[in-house]
Image (cartoon, rainbow, N blue to C red):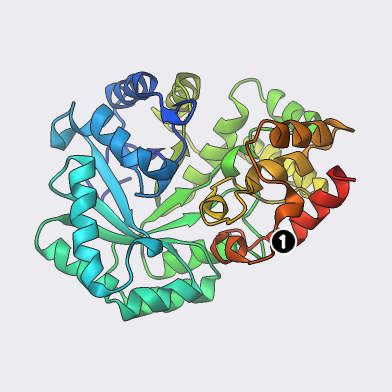
Amino acid sequence: MNEQFPQVKKNLGFGCMRLPMKGKKVDCDEFTRMVDAFIENGFNYFDTAHGYIDGKSEIAIKQCLTSRYDRDKYILTDKLTENYFKSEKDIRPFFESQLEICGVDYFDFYLMHSQNRMNFKKYQACRAYETAFDLKKEGKIRYVGISFHDKAEVLRKILTAYPELDAVQIQFNYYDYNSSIVESKKCYDVCREFNKPIIVMEPVRGGQLVKLPKSAKEIFDSLNGGSVASYAIRYAASFDGIFMVLSGMGNMDMMNDNISYMKDFKPLTQEEHRAVMEVRGILKKQQIVACTSCKYCVSGCPKKISIPDIISCLNCKRSGVGKKDYEKLIARGKSGKASDCIKCGKCEDVCPQKLEIRSILEDAASRYEK
């Protein structure tokens, strides 16, 4: 399964964008227990980035993983994110700081982060790809890849410009498979055309494919075994060319569940695949706002609006509950009001889902503030 990367033991990766938390701090005791369970069960792939959890993810990686295990016991992926460099000369110092924070001498995978039509121009102008390839030659990176959020035509352009890339990370799940915005299938097809191993992110869409309406959940329950999450993750892992599926696990229960069906992975059966398609049909009719709660939009918001939390309120279809949740969110000081939005558009510039966030906030203000 991992012929290209023999060090990678299994096809489930620990995504460290969503870790167990105690207030605003990573719960390192719980994270340590999860790391130990993950490794003890034969898994070894960990994925982080400098901006995850406001910089806390890399620090927790060092405390809970790299300071406790020999270097050959784990695979560590980190990323070069756009807002941490302005020119070519900034990239190496930033990269070296990441190595130090994570407590390692090299990264197994280093990805050009969240590539799209616009920021790809900056990465090219700053020779980011060339710098990463040089670091690979120096032994500080084993494999250079990209994480990608745009149309398939843009992915084709990148892979044509840099055919030496080792891997591509794409958003891929049963909900987005035929999406005209995310273009999961089309991006998957481009990766296969260029013979690039695929890493999957957002297999459960930030939890949206776990919090299912009753009618959808009953379909999976009728299959006599397996959690709701298991069908989403196994769906993604069942495709040819996918060598890694990332799962953001926030507690030991999630970890144990994932281990239970990915330790001895089996692709979806025909019956299970039909069930997944039926659930997808139900979800498409729900007309939910397709936010994955990545929170990229939050860090740059000048009004401190917790956009994913407000979208979660809008997605609540139970009468009155969304409004109550919104009022609690504002009353507790966890977010600026939707009406505080000054329409600067920074959120939309970084949104991987290409959501029209300014209009969404207008809708929330009209629903919940009058």
The residue drawn where x is 58% and y is 64% is 346
Q: Is residue 4 visible?
A: no
Residue 114: quarter of image? bottom left
**In the rendered image, the vertical position of residue 118 relative to residue 320, given as above or below:** below
Which quarter of the image is occupied by the C terminus? Answer: top right
**Who's the residue at 64% across and 39% down the image?**
209
Return the residue nearer the eye: 241 or 16.
16
Q: Is residue 214 left or right of residue 265?
A: right
Q: Picture coordinates of residue 294 (x, y %)?
A: 54, 47
In the rendered view, would you say 12 is above or below 88? above
**Considering depth in this image, is 197 or 283 the residue closer to the camera?**
283
- The N terminus sits in image quarter: top left
Name the residue located 41 percent from the left edge and 79 percent from the top edge.
121
Q: In the rendered image, which residue does mark 1 sit on? A: 358
Secondary element at tag 1: helix
Residue 219 at what x, y percent from top left?
74, 30
- Residue found 15% across the figure and 63% down from its top: 135
Image location (x, y in percent) of residue 106: 16, 49
Q: Position of residue 192 (x, y in %)?
A: 43, 64
